[in-house]
Structure formats: structure tokens, C-alpha cells
Image (cartoon, rainbow, N blue to C red):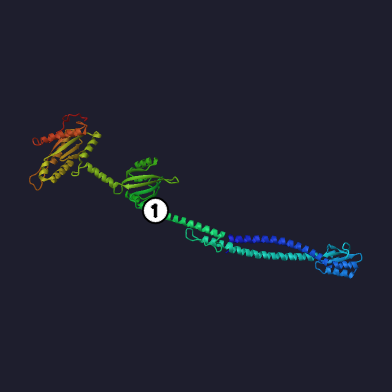
Amino acid sequence: MINIRGLGFRFSLFLVAAAMLVVLTTAEFFYRVTYENEITEANYDIEELYRTVGATASIASFLEEEDLAKEAINGLVKSEKILAASIKSDALYYQLNVTDAINKGTEPRVFLVRHPFIPEESLAEVNIYPNFDHIIQQAEKISTDNSYSLYIEALVVGIVALIITYYIIISPMLRVGRSLHEITPGTTQRIAVPEYHTDSEIGALVHDTNELLGKVEEQFSQERQLREEIEFLEMRFRMLFENAKSATVLMTESGIIELKNKAFIDLVEKIGLEEKQDYGELLEELFENPVAIKTSLLEAFSRNEFATGEFKLKSGANKTAIWVQLIASPLITDDGERFYQITFNDISTRKRELQKLALQADFDSLTGIYNRNGGEKLIAKLMSKDHHFALALIDLNGFKAVNDIFGHDAGDEVLIFVSEQLREKIRKVDVAVRWGGDEFLLLLQAEDEKSVETVISKVNEGVKQPFYFNDDTAPTVVSMSVGVAFYPRMSRNMNTLIKLADIAMYKAKQNKVAAPDNYLIFADPEGVGTSDNQ
């Protein structure tokens, strides 16, 4: 199928049109020139014919010989280019077909007949009437034949030129175009240089095009390698993101989650929420205290800083407390769009371990009640709130003998038993503390001695129960000596208050043999020689 928009068709059309224009112009020009030449040639032939018979006419006029005159005129009229002729002198006149010529309006050519011996003297004149119809017909025929010959010649030249142009220029360019169209950019395919065009403009075009294809291949190769590297990195980053233990989300400024990993989905399921794309402006729906998290994040974002902190999530179905360390970073794209990257690190285990450590720091590992460190914190807390309380310091009597006779395991058993008795006999508002060794301390919500005596009496009844160790039939009994000081009546200083109770406890301990029932003594605020504000 011919492509009428193709270069070959358009070039051929242009070449044919140009050739036709040239042929028409040239043919018209040659027609006119040939026509004029033929007319001129006819006039020249008439003159030549006259010169041929001129001598005969001259002799005929000189001799006044009519037969010679007729012969000359008849000889002229025999030519197809002469329609009529006549000779006229003083003594001689002869004409042939003159009437017909005159009727046609033909003007004669007049020739003077010279004296054969005296050239300067004319004897007669000869009138020759050209046969213009014949001359014009011949001129037109010859001009037309020449034009046709020129047309044919131009047609042949045009066809030859078209064929040569096609095979030398158009066909190679079409092959180059088809080859270029079939080439896949970025491959090793190249255009073959057309035959006989190694050093031509087409060859130079093919060479430059192949260089360009080489550069495109190199660029494609680099881009392909770069794309593979990016895909590799993207795969690694996606694997890292998807399999990260830390829950991570990328969200818009309005709170719509654009990207999230499996750890985040697991975290949401863990706290009993359904998976969705929006959990509030800053995921506040996930937190137990949404106001605190929102305030913290917005304050950091207002300074264009990343926010971090430890926050408690909503409790899940099993009511287990979930704590996370949150890191939130504001991200701004090149288009000015704002995003937030939020990462959750589950620190619930660490929180529980810290709580456990806190318990270990404040509670006695053997008895399970508060240790001295925890007790001092409780005393300080009560003092800071200005609660009124009694501080009862207890020392066990006979505990050293249990350790010496039955061993430390028996001693631990006694301490555990005493601790249980303290917890059971005191009120819910009171607190038992293992102060150290075989010393205990009670924080009693009481402001008078009678209330203290009631509680201590119950504790004493429980503590002095007999023990039987190692199948020993003889019971072992421990007792206690108690010293009590009141806050704030006796002192507002912790160390002073403890010292007052300690002094009173030692006074009771001194009476354990002489007066075993007098095991409870209340402190004398003047016993330490200090004021109440110490």
C-alpha cells in the first residue's frame, strides 16, 4: 500500500510535477522558436528559389522571351511554399495562380530582375506569393513534432531520474526509516549502512543515528541498573519495614494512615480494636490518655522537632497493661505535603520488670512486706500529707536462740510467721514493715495510746504462739518488745521519730525478764533532747 504521506511518494510527486512544469515551459518555448524558425526558413527558401530562377528570368526579360519567362514562373510555383508568381516588364508579362492568391489576401514578395550585363539596371520584377497555409501548416507540424519529441524525451529523462533517485536516495532512506522503526531502544540493534552510501550524507546520518542509539543503550543500561538497585533496595526496605518488630505507620496530617506494617496491625488487635485507616488526628484513640499524647506531640511538632515519650495504650481484652515508647517525626515532601512517621516500641515487659524491681527495692524478699527502704518512703509520704500516725518499732525476743539452736532456716520460718501475724492482726489502714534483722515496724493510723495498745495486743497474741522445730517436744516461744512514737505530736522529723521509738523499744526490751507483760512502752519526747520540729 502506497503511503501518500511518505517521503518517497511526496518526493516522486514533487519530481513529476517539477518535470511537467519544466517540460510544458520548455515545450512552449521550443514550439514558438521552431515556428518562427520555420517561417523564417520558408522565406529564406523562397529567396533561394528566386535565386535559382533569377538568371532565367533575367535572360527572358533581356531577350523578351516569353517561353523562358513561363519556365521560370512555372518552376517557382512548383514549390509547395509558393502559391502564385508573376513576371512583369515593359515588353513581357506572365502570371500563374495570382488571382487565387489575391483572393486569399496574400501579399507578394517583390524581386527586381537585373540586366544580365548591366547589374545596376533592372529589366523587370517578379512577384512571388508565399503559400502561407502550407508554410504555417508545416511550421506547426514541425513544432508539434518537436514538442512531442521533447515531451517524450522529458518523460524518459524524468522516469530515469525518478528511478535513479528512488534507488539512490529514496529507497535507502526508506530502508533506514524501516530499520529505525523496527529497532527497540536500549538494545544492541543498529541500522545497516545502505550499499554505496558509506561516505554519503545518508551514511553519515546512519552513523550518527547508530551513535545516538549507542548512547541510548548506555543510558537505558544505566537506568535499568539503577532501577534494579532501587527495586532491590525497595524490596529490602519493604522487608525491613514489614518484618520490623516496632509498629510503624505513615499518616497524613489529618490522621489518615497511608502505610502501616504488620507489627502495627498486631498491636491494634492486641488492644482489642478493629483495623482501619483512621484512629484520630494523632492516633489518640489508641491511648489511655489521648489528651496527654496529643498535647505532647503537637508541642514537639510546633517546634518542627520529633516527639518521644512513654505512653500507656488502652487495655486489651485480657486487661494487660501495654506501654509503648513512641517516636513521632514530621515529614514534609517536596510538594509541601505534611506527613507523620510514628513508631511504637513495646516496652511493656521493661515496664513490668521496672515495677518488679521497684517492688524488690521496697519489699522484703523473705516476708513479702515492706522493707526499710519502702517503709521510709511510706513515712515520708504520710508526713508530706500531714497524716497523724503512730510509729511502733518491734524487736523479737529469743530470735537469736532460734538461729543458734535450730539454724537460719528455722529463723526465716519465724520471721515469715511473725510477718503473717502482723498482716493479719493490724487493720487495713495500717502497714507492716520489716525494719531489718528481727526488727519490725508498724505504721498505725492512731493518735492515742489506747488505740495503739488495742492493735499491739492483737499482734502480741499472734506472735507468741509456740513453735516446734525438728520434732522437738519442747515448744519454742518468741516474744516482742515494742516502742511507740506519735507523729506529729512527738516530732515532725523522721529520724527523730524513729529514734524516739527505738529508745522506747529498748526500754521495753530491758523489762522482758523482770516484767514480760510490760512489752509496750510509749516514747518520751524529751528523751532525745530535741524539739518536735527536728
Q: In which quarter of the image is residue 93?
A: bottom right
Q: Which of 107 and 533 is in front in this view?
A: 107
Q: Nearer the viewer, residue 359 or 77?
A: 77
Q: Nearer the viewer, residue 289 or 44?
A: 44
Q: Quadrant of residue 283?
A: top left
- Determine the residue located farthest toward the front in the rendered image: 117
- Determine the residue located farthest toward the left in the rendered image: 474
* Residue 486 % position (x, y): 19, 33
Is residue 95 among the parts visible in the rendering? Answer: no
Tell me the residue at 9%/35% (across/down): 515
Q: Which residue does the numbered mark 1 point to in the structure image?
A: 233
| Residue type highlighted by circle 1 | Leu
Other residues around mark 1 within 10 Å, as few (<14) / some (14–19) / many (≥20): few
Quarter placement of the C terminus: top left
Quarter placement of the N terminus: bottom right
* Residue 174 % position (x, y): 56, 62
Is residue 396 among the parts visible in the rendering? Answer: yes
| Left or right of 288 on screen, residue 2 | right
* Residue 37 % position (x, y): 76, 62
Residue 17 higher or lower than 260, as above or below: below
| Left or right of 492 on screen, residue 270 | right
Q: Nearer the viewer, residue 13 or 71?
A: 71
* Residue 84 % position (x, y): 84, 66
Callout 1 secondary element: helix
Marks counted in the figure total 1
- Determine the residue located farthest toward the right in the rendered image: 91
